Amino acid sequence: MQVELADVESKDMQVLYQDDDGNVHVMDGTTFEQAVLSSELFGESRRWLGTPELVVSVSYFQGEPVAAKLPYKISVKVLDAPASVGKEDGTSTRHVVVEGGISVVAPSFVRTGDIIVVRTEDASYMTKG
């Protein structure tokens, strides 16, 4: 049995904006070619599409986009960091709101205006950026 490999091309593209229908408009930074993608191509990571200056990897098969993925981690600005409440074990974390309106559990030292690094897959805090 012989299997033919699919000719898939991947391009890094900058997210320009998401329109009212949920489509994602992207641009190749080298050729300035633009494309419109379904947000479904991004899976659960689509919640990060509102992050400024986001670059994604888009896979094309026979000229059609078939998949898109975000970087493993991104830097985002903290928009709201309410006061934290300490736990009995001495640790303290709380939910902060970052760009795109996404809630991330972060350590108590993270403040409004800070840049933090989060994992796009599950919105988990990685480090202060």
Image (cartoon, rainbow, N blue to C red):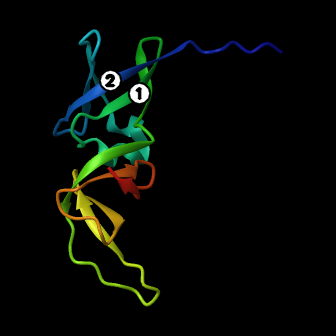
Q: Is residue 9 left or right of residue 32?
A: right
Q: Residues within 10 Å of mark 2 (few under 14, many from 20)?
A: many
Q: CA distance from mark 2 to mark 1?
A: 6 Å
Q: Quadrant of residue 39?
A: top left
Instruction: Residue at 23% x, 43% y: name it.
Output: 50
Q: Is residue 114 left or right of residue 69?
A: left
The reply to whether the C-beta atoms of the residues labelled 2 and 1 are less than 8 Å apart is yes
Secondary structure of the residue carrying tag 1 is: strand
Measuring from the top left, give residue 76's x and y in whole percent. Answer: 27, 48
The residue wearing badge 1 is 57
Where, quadrant-wise, is the N terminus in this rendering?
Answer: top right
Q: Quadrant of residue 107?
A: bottom left
Secondary structure of the residue carrying tag 2 is: strand
The front one of 19 and 76 is: 76
Residue 123's mark? none
Q: Residues within 10 Å of mark 1 (few under 14, many from 20)?
A: some
- Furthest residue toward top: 31
Instruction: Residue at 39% x, 45% y: name it.
Output: 45
The front one of 78 and 10 is: 78
Instruction: Residue at 40% x, 35% y: name it.
Output: 41
Disc 2 marks which amino acid? Met
Residue 13's mark? 2
The front one of 3 and 45 is: 45
Mark earlier in primary sequence (2, 1): 2
Q: Is residue 106 above or below residue 45?
A: below
Instruction: Residue at 24% x, 39% y: name it.
Output: 22
Disc 1 marks which amino acid? Ser
Measuring from the top left, give residue 108's x and y in whole percent. Answer: 31, 72
Measuring from the top left, give residue 37's x and y in whole percent. Answer: 31, 28
The front one of 17 and 97 is: 97
- Furthest residue toward bottom: 88
